[in-house]
Amino acid sequence: MIIIMKPSATREHVEELSRHIERWNVKANPIYGEGTIVIGLVGDTGAVDKDALLRDPEVDNIIKVQEPFKLANRKMHPADTVVDIAPGVSVGGSKLVVMAGPCSVESEEQIVDIARHVQAQGATALRGGAWKPRSSPYSFQGLQADGLELLHKAHEVTGLPVVTEITNPAHIDLFADKCDCFQVGARNMQNFELLKELGQTRKPVLLKRGFANTMEEFLMSAEYLMAGGNENVILCERGIRTYETFTRNTLDISAVPVLKRMSHLPVIVDPSHAGGIYWMVEPLAKAAVAAGADGLMIEVHNDPAHALSDGAQSLTYESFAETMASLRAVAAAVGRSL
């Protein structure tokens, strides 16, 4: 349920009304936008006396939210949310964020060198895997805690904020001081225990869509994070599984405008995992920017041919520079910048 207040409503009145509403055992979330004030009600609103609320002189209208996701719903929060992952690095504003780096951290020399090169080409965050959930138990599983330390070392050298995947709720404290944004991978999108624990933090969470999940299921996973109090959620489309086998996945470019319509949360795209082939990354990235994405996650490696994981989809330094140049032109065409 959403209560739309009149423009004349004061903050004091909104807060007083919110306290009154919570007597019905629901959570009231006042949201102050530009020219719009709404109170979002979360919980069982069956006992809420709608007629009594409409008698309040500062209440303009009341809307029932039918979708199961409430906090992530654009109806609940009409203005776009901007998530700050580091000073000067925001996801959801006019400037697009590019998170670039290797699939896996392999050594200090490798991750520091990559961080320096992607930063020089305009990347605003460093991505890299320390723990690597893999389809095969025999594949490289990442350097784990050592990899996390190396990512932090690259951050100290370049200043780039770090985005890295977490798979275990028990690792949250270990990650807390070593990364700027938790990444929840596609395989863990519905790892509800992990989502609940990350919801208790206030550090940004980049949530990837599962490769066989609907938009509603995706937003319900975001709801788990937000229900715990963490509103710093970034949605990431990374391709879904279809009948096509030529590409690793099929990029659902329609997810960008659909999610933007359904939710107020920022949306980025991972063209590397979507296509799975290096030469597809640039055209898919340009399509994502044109569709309205707030950023990109791109895999870059200093030696893709000998990468320990996902070398086939990783860009070289040269191809990343060319991709960034082409993205600047597309971004400018849609009123954005890199």
Image (cartoon, rainbow, N blue to C red):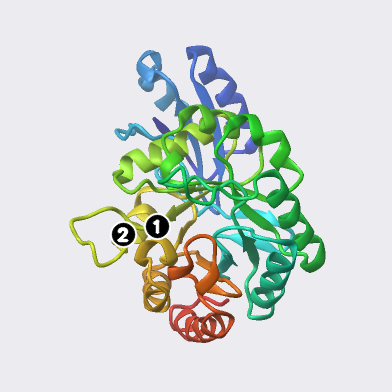
**What kind of element bears circle 1?**
loop
Taking the image as shown, residue 116 lies to the left or right of residue 47, namely: right
* Residue 138 on image: x %, y %: 47, 46
Q: Residue at x 36, y 74 (%)?
A: 287
Residue type at mark 1: give it: Arg
Instruction: Tell me which residue sits at (63%, 58%) in the image.
Output: 105
**Horizontal and vertical percent position of residue 37:** 52, 43
Q: Amino acid at mark 2?
A: Asn
Q: Nearer the viewer, residue 131 or 207?
A: 131
Q: Which residue is mark 2?
A: 249
For label 2, the SS is: loop
Tell whether label 2 touches label 1 (CB within 8 Å). Answer: yes
Work out whether residue 333 can be spotted: yes
Please tell me which residue lies in front, 15 or 297: 297
For the N terminus, the quadrant is: top left
Q: Residue furthest front?
A: 138
In the picture shown, does residue 34 fall above or below 2? below
